[in-house]
Structure formats: structure tokens, C-alpha cells
Image (spheres, rainbow, N blue to C red):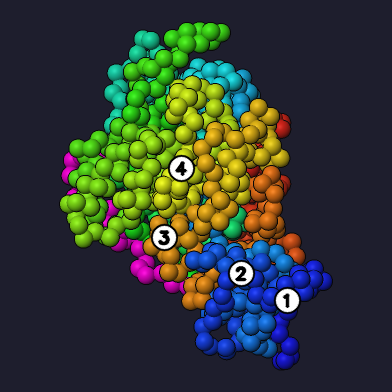
Amino acid sequence: MSDQPTSFTRRRSMGAAFVALLAPTELLVGCSGDSSDPAPADTVLRNGYVYTVDEHDAVQQAVAVRDGLIVHVGSNSSAAAYIGPNTQVIDLAGRMLMPGFVDAHMHPLAGGRALLQANLNYAPLTRAQMQTLIQGFLDSTADQEPDTWLEVVNWDRQSTQSLDTDPTKETLDALHTSRPILVRSSDFHTVLTNSRGLALAGVTRDTPDPTGGSFDRDADGNPTGICEDAAGWAVSAVIPPDTEADQLNQARAALAQMRRSGITTFMDASAGDAQGSAFTALQKSGELTARAFFAIQIAAEDAAADPAAAVAAAATLANTYDQGEPQVTPGIRFRHLKLFGDGVVNAPADTGGLLTPYFTNAGTDAAPNWVPGTNTGADYFPPSVLNPLMAAIASSGFDPHVHATGERTVRQVLDAVAYARTQVSSTTFRPVIAHNETVAVADYPRYAQLDVMASFAFQWAQQAGYSVGDTQYHLGEDRFQRMEPFGSVRNAGARVGFGSDWPIDPMDEFLALKCAVTRSGDPQNPNSAAYTNPNYTGPINSDPALSRADTLRAITLNSAWQLRMEQNIGSIEVGKYADLIVLENNFMQASDEALGRNSVLLTMVGGTVVMGTGDYATLGTTLNAKISAAQASRARQIEQALNWGAYNPYACQCGMRHNILPRQA
């Protein structure tokens, strides 16, 4: 065996120049860390800009990893003591190394499913353009006539409503098909179905609205085909369920997307048996490449009937899958409870709970006159239900994760937390409010006072069809100017975290981070609304942004806190798991305009490289060695589909990219 260390020398000359530049100070900012055990490491990453996210946001040069744990953080010279004959040495060549992303609010099985289905790709479409695309999907799957459901995902309803008007069942009935069709909005709060779909779901003018949702109706009371929240779930429920094999492929597709995006830990924000079963199966087969956390949804009607029983039922499900204390290798945790407090504040849905009514146009399109209406949005968990439920959660050992987009719903959640802390004074629960799109100014300091974390999808702080135009008018100028208040909430002392809410939007963590820093999109990023519409360039409003340091802390250590993992992940410190990513461009040094044009070159989870690209590509091959040949083959097919390759594309001439995987028994 050679006595030389295994070496990976990427852009060696650039790395040497970088180190020489730093040589006079030897160390960058902050203090190094050491495990007091200089035994050879498995891996040493050196010659980098190591952004640690420790208490000082220190920057170092090198990291040593042994048995999946970080054993040293410091300078190149101090890390040299950890290089032995079998140590893999990765030359970072001056690139930024940081903790892996912790995406603490997403829907990965739905995201993987969307990647493999007929996909409108969040495009701004008129009704006629929607018809053209959906007809193309139907024509390319004509063998599934007349009874197989066509499911279409990632419809940007707000853009359609802005460009044209809401489609109805008649929009889909005009297509050349006998099949039932369901089109799901990208925010997952609305579905559109055709007359056949309504009939199969048994929805008529006499069908009552379900708790937590509504069927849109015309002047005669007939359903239009637009189904909000629980009404959409009721229609979706009649579609034959995915097979276990389908769900495994959806989970594989989601994990592949996460690896490439630098996500090393995620939380599924609305999970049940399907999610637990699929990701547990992949964990057992060695295919789980991110730490997996799941929030079990509690239905409003169950909470209203018996809050203690609702929490107990969730505990039974959690005990089926939860694997206990974390380990170096990724595992499964079920320890959060999800509540949908309201809908969305975006027009035309207007279902987010507000303190004062949405505005309505009392004039004409040519001469609008926006005045307060009567609608104040949805109230899925009124205080009479939410308060006792929050107290039950506070004494259960679970942590609550509450969807709240409207200012009234946010206030009711804060009030419920205050009530629970009074009723259960010994509680150590960690409440999180997700989204917080509109918040009353008086409530900004209450997050810190009540130790409630505010989780935001930062990419929503950009001008887009869902945020300006009708949404702006419906909210009113005062509320709109405070929309997406993560800077104000942070300045009031709150802990701010991040959750992409994927697949509500495309998975693009860097665009989200760019929006956190600039409160604007990127006209050169295809995932930004400004890319297709120059009118969407510039900040959404004048509310404060986050600093770059606060932004990176939100997607790492703060989101780790939400998951009770801050002692294990979220920063580069000795003793923590080696969940690390290498960036193409230095986020702390790039221009504001370029922040959303970055990429991840290497993703490491628990000391194992699970993704490498470009000059790091050979480092990612260790993952496939852990997966059987059949599983690896299927994973490659999924990767091809995600890369928009030739694998089973829809034969659609619409100019957009559609790829699906066939079902397997």
C-alpha cells in the first residue's frame, strides 16, 4: 500500500494561490476546533473558504472527518496532522464549503411525484395555452382512454387569473377526451377538474362544502370545477392510489433532486403512512441520502372532536416509523405535528385568515375602485379548537408546525402558544409558524417573546403573478407593503428558519436565498418570474431583507433547531455530523445579482459523498456501491428523467419539457 495520502487535486494551482494569499494570517476568522485525537481522518477537505455558521460565523480553511463526524476545523497546517496514508484529501481550490442545507418545510413525495408527471412547470398560461398543453398530454397518452385519470401538476393559477380569468370545468370539457382530468395548482390549495371528474367524485350542486375547504359555484349554485383545499382533497381521493412501487420512485426522484440541491436534511410538512413507508424502505436499502423528518397532519375535524385523541392517533403513527435518536447515517424521525391554520392570501383564492376583509373591486376593470369587502378568509382551526389542541401538543412531546399565511391566523397561533405555555408550564415544545406571509406589526415581537420560530419560503418575496397584481389589490396597499416580513420579524428578535415548500415552487434553494437578501427575483434565472416577465424585476416591497449571514443561518442552524438537531448538524463544528456542501460560487462574496445563479458541486452526508459533479464527479460514485444493481439501474432512469433526457418523454410539441416514469407493479 502506498504511503501517500489518497489525493483529489482539483484546480491545484488556484488552490495554492488561495492558500498563499492567506498564509500571513494562517487562519481566517475565528478559532479552530479539534477533537484532541489526531488519528488519521477518513477525509480532509482543505484549501477552502470554510463558512462554519458557528456562534461567530467563523471562516476556516480545512475540515477533517472521521467515522462520519467532524474531528477538526481549522487551518490547512493544523489539518495536516489528520492526513494519513489512507486519508482522502479533497482540494477545495478556494471554493466555499458550508453546512448542508436543512430544508425544514417541503413535500418530497409530492415533489417527486410532480417530477414524474404531466407538468405545467409553473409557467404563466392563459386558458387557451393551458388547453393546448393539456391536449398534448392527452394525445401522447391516448392508450389510456377513456377512463384513466390525467393528473396535471404545477399550474400557476394566479398567473392564469391575472393573464386571463379562472378556468372552469368547461375549459377542460372542451378538450378531445373522455378521461377525467385533475389539474393541481402549484400551491396545492386548488384543483381544477372536468365534468367527468366531478361526477366520479359525486360532487353536485347539493354537495356541501367540507370542513376546511369549498367548491366554487356559479350563480346557480353549480360547481365550477374549482375546488379549494379540503374540497380538492375530496376529489383527489377518488383517483386510484399510487402503488408502493410508484411511491418508491417518487421518493427516489425527490432524493436525487435534494442531493443535487445540497439538501442534507429535510422535513416533510404533511406526512402519513405513504411517506413513512416509502422513505423507510429506501433507508433500509441504503438509498436514503438525507436525514428525514416528518410532520403528521392533524385534521381540523379530529381536533375539534377530541384534541387529546387526535394527538394520540398521531403518536400511534409516529411510533410505527420513528427510529429514535439520530445517528451518523440518515434515519427517519416522526416528531412533529402539522396543522393547516388557513389557506392562502393570494388572489383569487383569498383564503388566508385576515384581521380585516380583503378588498374587492367595486368599480370596473378600466376604472377600478378597491374597497373592503366581507371576506376575511378561512378559519380552519378557530381558537376554541386551536387552544386546547396546542395545550395537548405541548404536553405530548411533539412539536407543532402550523401553516399560517394570514395575519389573523398568525395571531391566533401565537395566542394558542401563549395559552399552551400557561396551561403546561413545564413544556419544552418548539412551535413553528410556517409562511407568515402577512403579520400584524404588533405581533412581530411576540415570536421572540413566546419562543416561536418563523419559517419562511424566501422565494415568495419576489414580484410574481402570485404576489403582485390582484393579490396586491386584494390585500390592500398597507398589508402588501408588509408582505413576507422576514426582515421585520428577524429585527424584532425572532429566530427565522427556511422551508422551500417544494413542489409549491421549483426546487431552487439559491433563488430563495437570493430573495432573502434582495427581496427580488432574478431575470437570468428560469425559475424566477422576472425571467419571463421583465415587469417583475425589482424588490417586491420595502420591508427589510436579511443579511447574508442570517440567510445562511436560516437554512442551516436555525432550521436544525426546529428539528432539535442543532447539536448534531447545521454548523461545521467538532463533534457534529459531516453534512457538508461545496458551492460553485462563494455566497458571501458574490454580487447581489448573482446570488441566485449558484450551484452545488459536492454533497456529503455523514461523511459520505452522495453527489459530486464536474471535477468532483468521481467522488459521488461511492453511493452506487451501496445500492443493488437493480436499484442503481432504476435510480439512473430517474436521474435521466430529471435531467430531461430521452427517457420516456411526452411526445408533446408544446415547447416545454415533460418526462414521466411508467408505473411498476
Eye-nearest disc, 3 or 4: 4
First along the sequence among labels 2 and 1: 1
Q: Which residue lies at the image location 30% right of the left edge and 25% below the top edge?
A: 209
First along the sequence among labels 2 and 3: 2
Which residue is labeled 1 in the image?
24
Which residue is labeled 3 in the image?
561
Residue 309 position within the rendered picture, expressed as x and y whole percent measured from the top left: 19, 49
Label 1 near label 2: C-beta < 8 Å?
no
First along the sequence among labels 4 and 1: 1
The disc at residue 488 is: 4
- Quick check: 188 above or below 179? below
Q: Distance between the residues labelled 3 and 4?
A: 21 Å
Q: What element carries label 4?
A: helix
For label 4, the crowd category at 10 Å Cα-Cα, with few meaning under 14, some 14 to 19 and many 20 or more, is: some
Q: What stretch is highlighted in magenta?
A: 300-328
For label 2, the crowd category at 10 Å Cα-Cα, with few meaning under 14, some 14 to 19 and many 20 or more, is: some
For label 1, the crowd category at 10 Å Cα-Cα, with few meaning under 14, some 14 to 19 and many 20 or more, is: few
Residue 424: tell me if it is visible.
Answer: yes
Q: Distance between the residues labelled 2 and 3?
A: 24 Å
